[in-house]
Image (cartoon, helix red, strand yellow):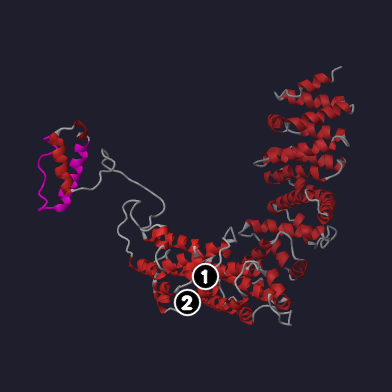
Amino acid sequence: MDRIDSGLASTKDDDTHSKSIAYKRREWLSALLETGDEKVIAAYQKYEQINPAPIEHPGFNRWTEIWAGSTSPLTVEKLSSLSNAQIAEYLTNFKETEVFRKSDPTERGLAHTLEKCVEADPQKFTDNLLPFQDVSSFYQSSLLHGFLTAWREKKEFNWKALLEFICQILSSVRFWSVQYKTGFNYRNWCLSAAADLIREGTKDDKHAFDIQLLPLAEEILLILAKKTESSMFALTDSSIDALSSDRGKVFSAMVNQALRSARNSEAEDIDCRWPYAIRSDFTKRLDRSVETSLEFSYTLGFYLPNLLYLDEQWGVGNIDRIFPQQDEDHWQAAFSGYLLSSRYPHTNLYVWLKANGHYQKALNTNFADKEAQGRLVSHLCVGWIKDWETFDDDTSLIYQLINSYNPNLLSAVVHFFLTESETLSQSIDSEKIKAYEKVKSKVRPAWRALFKVLSRNSHEVAYQRILSSLSAWLGLVDKIDTEILESVKTSIKYINKVPGYGMTLSRVIEALLRHVLITPQQVGKIYLAIPKSEMWYLQGMKRDNIEKTVHILYEKGHNGIADEICNRFGESGVDFLRSVYEEYRH
């Protein structure tokens, strides 16, 4: 006790040093407080007068505390109780001090509270937005995000006041003159939120702002298109990033604004439905020396069917400017957007794009976004199903697709027919039932063509993996003939070449149960071709299906092949078929 209490430096000499020593001695003495010793208590109180800071984590020389999030100086309830003028004044005057612990209030915490206040009662804020003209862009962006969330939650407010507020922000010299550090450009946050608001306010006629406000929205969008910076400087492996970028949001909002205007227009000229100013702006930007952003190219492709609705003559007439084949990055951005806009191609667009060589170019393009490549395959397969393509012509896109020897494309063909068939087969809609039958009618010729290409290269793992997946097509045919039997027997050998191959094997076993009543001998031969290494997996995943299939083989009098299947499982150390085997020994 005496050693702890000795030699404290004078607070007059070094106040910070003295407080540090006092804190440390209080920390030591705190361990003795429970003794009730008067000298301990007196010393503790003396040092507490010098430094009353709460003792945290006693006994640790170092302590690091990490937390996520931020703390607001006011609760949502408290901030909401203030008038709009008082809220704006508080935002302006609040200054964040050094943040040492999660209880320390921050500007980010206050901004989050502001956003929650707007979200809870947006009408209160649109009643008087004038005070918020002078708050920082940081808080203005939170204000706009609050309105965005409120609108998505179907809450009503005064859109005219909000759009006028945005216009006033955009006309402010201060708004454009502030310089921001990299990564903290709050001006861009405001621009992005403004574009999101207009897009959300126009995309659904059942929940949209009044059409009388469309010219005001258009005025804002044209400013945003001029001022918002591009953030996509190269093609990415997820082209959808283009639409979610600041500039992508602006162009998306422009299309949505034009579509809402067109849907509610009483103009007699239905050949050109979109507002002149938006159409003129888009036309100007078709010159990639004027509009260099990849976001614009992606938007053009993604919304191309909508642009055709707005003005088919403009879309068709500019098809090669929308997809500039001489500019690889912009062409790929635009075509990726087009492919990802829909799994199924628009009939007229398919014809025009094919005629102009764009689908042909796509077949030879290594898309940065691999999902675009899958969608390309979907488009070409749909083209074949709808008889726009034929295997009889070596210039046909479907012929070139199958004979591309590109493992990624061929794998996508297998996946397309599986998913398309499974989706359509679950429908009770008469049109989808017809579509399902149409898809099934293409399975055999596609299987034959794929197997021919794949089997030629079956020494390569990449092709073995596709052959393995091709086994699952067994569920898409009505009967196992000799050709299908030989294909499945070859494919099933490579069943374990694909990561997650269990789904393929499960599909095969389910299909065999459906086929066993019609072609029992063929079903048995396929069972005998399944690698023994997979018997343990089948015991755990498809035991019931296998038992039912073997029972049917015995009942149909195919005892020899049924015995072979039971023995094959037994030789692999899997004996769940023993009871079935013994049941038919008599």
Image height check: is 178 above or below 448? below
Which segment did they paint magenta?
Answer: 1-30
Q: Mark 1 and 2 residues: CB-CB less than 8 Å, in contact? A: yes
The one of 115 and 461 positioned closer to us in this rendering: 115
Q: Is residue 562 left or right of residue 175?
A: right
Q: Amino acid at mark 1?
A: Ala
Residue 191's spot in the image, x, y percent?
A: 50, 70
Residue 444: mark in rendering: none
| Residue 89, quarter of picture | bottom left
- Which residue sits at x=77%, y=31%? 546
Image height check: is 464 above or below 268? above
Identify the image quadrant of the C terminus: top right
Who comes first in sequence, dot 1 or dot 2?
Answer: 2
Residue 480's spot in the image, x, y percent?
A: 86, 40
Q: Residues within 10 Å of mark 1 (few under 14, many from 20)?
A: many
Q: Is residue 212 left or right of residue 573?
A: left
Residue 194: mark in rendering: 1
| Residue 571, quarter of picture | top right
The one of 67 and 552 positioned closer to us in this rendering: 67
- Is residue 252 at all visible to an observer of this figure? no
Tell me, yes or no, whether the highlighted magenta stretch contains residue 562.
no
- Which residue sits at x=70%, y=54%? 409
Tell me, yes or no, whether the highlighted magenta stretch contains residue 9.
yes
CA distance for labels 1 and 2: 10 Å
Residue 170: mark in rendering: 2
